[in-house]
Amino acid sequence: MVKLLGAGLILFAAFAIGFQLKQRLAEHVRQLLAFQEMLLMLDRELSFARTALDEAFLHIAGQGKEPFSGLLMEVAGRMRKEREATLQEIWRSAVEHRREEFYFSEEEFYILTGLSENFGYLDVQMQVGNIALYVRQVEYRISKARDELALKQKMYQYLSVMCGLFLILILI
């Protein structure tokens, strides 16, 4: 009876690990889509509403999704408080501070960090063009992440259960 209970617990733990890995992949895709949405909203704020960046960040944060809402709120707040710091410094610092919240690869994180390089000192058209470039990069990352999700989701689930069954066989 104890062996059967132990085997059930091992199998449950293996299934839970596979489910967690699946959820992490799905969250990665969700965050990339939220990143794309944030960029498109920023494009609209700059090109149509002609809003100042700190106001645009606050407006987008109110409509956006985490972890980007928190990031934009932090950047807007620091822009208003820290007048001597550049937007690039504030953005990079805030992104680094919140790095744990993102399920991004190094390349995707580099895209997020580099987003601020042309904020503030280019004219509106150049900023909008820069955002369009980032949107295309994120779209490419989304397609890659969706392919990876479709490929690896089932593999993680099956592999984790098979490892659990293998461990049960070894222990019995």
Image (spheres, rainbow, N blue to C red):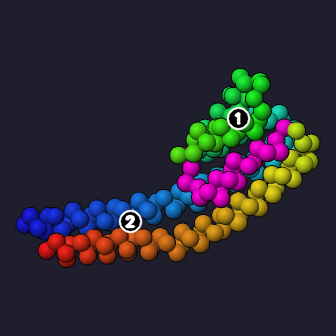
Checking the image for residue 165, the label placed there is: none
Residue under pointer 2: 18
Q: Quadrant of residue 5?
A: bottom left
Magenta stretch, main secondary structure class: helix
Quadrant in which the C terminus is drawn: bottom left
Query: What amino acid type is highlighted by mark number 1?
Result: Ile
Checking the image for residue 90, the label placed there is: 1
Q: Is residue 33 left or right of residue 133?
A: left
Is residue 63 among what the camera can see?
Answer: no
Query: What amino acid type is highlighted by mark number 2?
Result: Gly
Seen in the picture, residue 108 relative to 61 is either above or below; the reply is below
Considering the numbered disc 2 on the image, is that residue within a helix, a strand or a loop? helix
Residue 2 is covered by the magenta coloring: no
Residue 102 is covered by the magenta coloring: yes
Residue at 58% x, 41% y is 98
Q: Nearer the viewer, residue 2 or 94?
A: 94
- Indicate which label's residue lies in the foreground, 2 or 1: 1
Is residue 105 among what the camera can see?
Answer: yes
* Mark 1 closeness class: few <14, some 14–19, many ≥20 residues within 10 Å: some
Residue at 64% x, 37% y is 94
Seen in the picture, residue 166 relative to 23 is either above or below; the reply is below
Q: Quadrant of residue 60?
A: top right
